[in-house]
Image: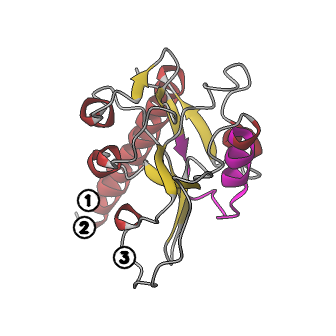
Amino acid sequence: MNTFIAIEPERCIGCGTCQAACSEGHRRAGLQAEPRLALVYTSQVSAAVTCHQCEGAPCLAVCPVDAITRTEEAIVVSEQTCIGCKLCAIVCPFGAIHPSGTPISGVVGTSFATPSQPRGTSPLLAWDIGVYTCAVKCDLCSTYDPEGGPHCVKACPTNALYVRDATTLTGIRKDKMKAAASANEIMMSRASNEGGTHA
């Protein structure tokens, strides 16, 4: 059973605290400061989108330089190995991998001002001269704080995020089954009452 961070959208207030905690934790570890989860806003709901640590892991299968590996805790990206091809982001079924750019210092990586172009509709199409791009995705904070657990979960002020694993899934499944059984009893009771009224 894969472990990943899940969200209860009805609790999410879209404050971005999870992103800030993720960014700060990775920055302190010397990794890309880009948050490993995204916030999606609609008129009805806001919710975090994060890696589901897929069993089949299409991102792992498609990486041409083996920058993505499976550890005991999570599927992780080696920022030093990643070449920024963005194939992993293209194949991710959840849109949970995105590119992050870091300006390269030195003669070879000198950035030159280029004519501005209209921004693409997708960050996957963006590129800048002199900026090294690598993939970022949720690693459950296992690359730098395996004992502390995901920082976004601890930082969420409304407890909208939680770590989903075999234990929590069993509890959630039981709760859903109880709710379905209760709803079924109510519907059966209403049907029998309505049947008795019409008779």
Residue lying farthest to the front in this orientation: 107
Residue lying farthest to the top in this orientation: 72
Q: Which residue is mark 3?
A: 120
Q: Which residue is mark 1?
A: 195
In this view, the residue in front, 26 or 14, is 26
Q: CA distance from mark 1 to mark 2?
A: 5 Å
Q: Is residue 11 located in the magenta-colored stretch of the structure?
A: yes
Above or below — where is 127 with respect to 20?
A: below
Element class at badge 3: loop
The location of residue 90, given as percent across then percent down, is: 29, 51
Q: CA distance from mark 1 to mark 3?
A: 60 Å
- Image quarter in which the C terminus is found: bottom left
Q: Which residue is mark 2?
A: 198
The location of residue 95, given as percent across then percent down, is: 38, 53
Above or below — where is 15 with respect to 5?
A: below
- Image quarter in which the N terminus is found: top left
Question: For the point 53% across and 68% down, which residue is it?
Answer: 45
Question: Disc 3 marks which amino acid?
Answer: Gly
Q: Which residues are magenta?
A: 6-26
Which mark lies nearer to you, 1 or 3? 3
